[in-house]
Image (cartoon, rainbow, N blue to C red):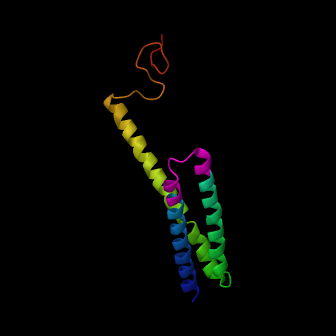
Amino acid sequence: MLLKSLLSGLLWGTGISVLNYYYLHWVIKKNEGQPPQKEMLAVVNCYIARYFINIAALFVVYRNMWMLVGTAVGLTVMKNVTLVQQYRKSRQQAWKAKKKRAAGKTPAKGETGEKGEAGSNSKE
């Protein structure tokens, strides 16, 4: 019963987390091209609504402690997935930039390739 409560809470929290994630993306996409003030206000309102949705999700399961713990962990799932996605994306971009520098297309940061300037390795 303990594991069943924990897993059902995890599933519930993950579902709410995924819905929150797509809700935020929908709001951002819907408000593209709007004036910056209006766009920012929409995103702030979305975050406030998401907090209330998370609190409501936790309130629904507050009587069962293990389900509450599972829900709390589930609510953090999309944050962790997003962090991993962004880390992988940044690693790919860094790898592509490194390959370009190795091919001689663009100099590395601080290198100009000319003598006497920043980044040159000559000691005159």
Q: Quadrant of residue 55?
A: bottom right
Left or right: residue 77 compared with residue 95: right
Across and down, in percent, residue 16 comes to 55, 71
Left or right: residue 107 compared with residue 64: left
Q: Can you say which quadrant of the picture contains the N terminus?
A: bottom right
Outermost residue on the left side: it is 103
Magenta stretch, residue numbers: 26-40
Residue 76 is inside the magenta segment: no
Residue drawn at 50 percent across, 58 percent down: 25
Outermost residue on the bottom side: it is 1
Residue 28 is inside the magenta segment: yes
Number of disc labels: 0
| Of 120 and 124, the residue lying toward us | 120
Left or right: residue 38 compared with residue 122: right
| Of 116 and 92, the residue lying toward us | 92
Residue 113 vertical placement versus 46 (above, below): above
Across and down, in percent, residue 39 comes to 58, 50
